[in-house]
């Protein structure tokens, strides 16, 4: 379900970053219609917080920067990513940086989202 708080985050960027975050949000919901969308980690320096999507645990966060929209996957190093979208990262986290004019492959992105959600619900070994 769409979160009014994430609506506010998107509206705060009336340029390509807001458009990108909105498009990514749509792909996430297409991939996982039951996804939970929230704004977390609100603080004085970022009063709107960070857009997050979860299902059985955190899937990814969406943050806007001057030069990119960054989607961070806390368990990204364990996600199957045959198209190589998760190129940025350190340790277990990996991210997708989207710069102005870039559009990640929709099918590959939805596959990464589904794989991240599957990690959250997989039996613990």
Image: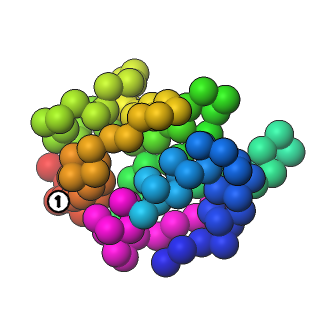
**Residue 16, placed above or below residue 101:** below
Q: Is residue 57 shown to the viewer in this render? A: no
| Label 1 environment density (alpha carbons within 10 Å; few <14, some 14–19, many ≥20) | few
- The picture places residue 39, in percent across and down from the top left corner, at 63, 60
Q: Residue at x 66, y 45 (%)?
A: 15
- The picture places residue 86, in percent across and down from the top left corner, at 31, 32
Q: Residue at x 27, y 44 (%)?
A: 105
Q: Is residue 4 shown to the viewer in this render? A: yes
- The picture places residue 101, in percent across and down from the top left corner, at 47, 34
Locate residue 27 relative to residue 51 in the image: left or right. left
**Residue 45, placed above or below residue 18:** above
**Residue 92, placed above or below residue 125:** above
Which SS class for mark 1?
loop
- The picture places residue 4, in percent across and down from the top left corner, at 66, 72
Q: Residue at x 54, y 38 (%)?
A: 69
Q: Is residue 33 magenta?
A: yes
Q: Residue at x 60, y 72 (%)?
A: 3
Instruction: Give the mark count.
Output: 1
Q: Is residue 48 magenta?
A: no
Locate residue 72 relative to residue 14 in the image: left or right. left
Q: Which residue is mark 1?
A: 123
The magenta span reads 27-39
The one nearer the camera, 53 or 64, is 64
Locate residue 4 relative to residue 19 in the image: left or right. right
Q: Residue furthest front?
A: 101
């Amino acid at each position: 379900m769409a979160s009014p708080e994430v609506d506010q985050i998107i509206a705060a960027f009336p340029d390509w970053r807001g458009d990108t975050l909105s498009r990514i949000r749509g792909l996430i919901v297409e991939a996982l219609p039951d996804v939970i969308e929230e704004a977390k980690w609100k603080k004085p320096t970022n009063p709107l917080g960070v857009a997050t999507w979860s299902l059985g645990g955190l899937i990814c966060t969406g943050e806007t920067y001057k030069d990119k929209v960054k989607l961070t996957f806390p368990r990204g190093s364990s996600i199957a990513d045959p198209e190589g979208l998760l190129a940025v990262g350190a340790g277990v986290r990996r991210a997708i940086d989207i710069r102005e004019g870039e559009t990640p492959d929709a099918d590959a992105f939805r596959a990464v989202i589904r794989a991240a959600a599957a990690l959250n619900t997989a039996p613990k070994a």
